[in-house]
Amino acid sequence: MTGLNLFDEGMKILGYVNDSGVSGREEMLRKALPLINRVYSDLYYSFEAVPGKEDGFKPLTAISQELTLSSAVLNDVAPYGMAMYLAQSESDADNQALYASLYNQKKTRGKRITTMKDSLPHIRG
């Protein structure tokens, strides 16, 4: 997924569209890169960073660049973060609050352990 794809997903989720496409898209694209990098950075440090290892995060320098996160994070979590920041940039408080809540819930759910090791207790005899 590129930064532009993420931006478009956020715009669709918010419903910032009309019959001919996204309303005000060009104006919003001018401020999109810093917003995309906020989401990217947040998710990188939440899901990809390894504690104690050298920081490997590199912000996007162009909206056409690929985000290097797992497809699960990019498809299930990132669009809601993008929607949250876009709504905030438009002073759309209701949507910002809604998508902030959804984004944080999805981030928390994504951090859960998805597999559990089967084990039997060791009994001393």
Image (tube, rainbow, N blue to C red):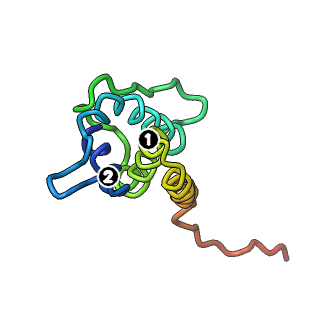
Image-quadrant location for residue 52: top right
Which of disc 1 and disc 2 is earlier in sequence? 2
Give the residue number, with chain letter if any, for mark 1: 90
For image coordinates 48% across by 55% down, the residue present is: 95
Give the residue number, with chain letter if any, for mark 2: 16
Dot 2 amino acid type: Tyr
For mark 2, give the secondary structure.
Answer: loop
For mark 1, give the secondary structure.
Answer: loop
For image coordinates 14% across by 53% down, the residue present is: 20
Give the distance between the C-alpha atoms of the residues marked 2 and 1, in whole angstroms.
11 Å
Q: Is residue 117 left or right of residue 22?
A: right
> Which is nearer the eye, 25 or 37?
25
Q: In the image, is residue 46 above or below residue 34?
A: below
- Position in image of residue 34 (x %, y %): 41, 28
Dot 1 amino acid type: Glu
Q: In this view, does 54 lie to the left or right of 31?
A: right
Which quadrant would the N terminus be assigned to in this image?
A: top left
> Do the residues under discs 2 and 1 have CB atoms within 8 angstroms?
yes
Image-quadrant location for residue 64: top left
Q: Residues within 10 Å of mark 2 (few under 14, many from 20)?
A: some
Q: Which residue lies furthest to the right in this view?
A: 125
Q: Residues within 10 Å of mark 1 (few under 14, many from 20)?
A: few
- Position in image of residue 68 (x %, y %): 34, 38
Number of numbered discs: 2
For image coordinates 45% across by 26% down, the residue present is: 56
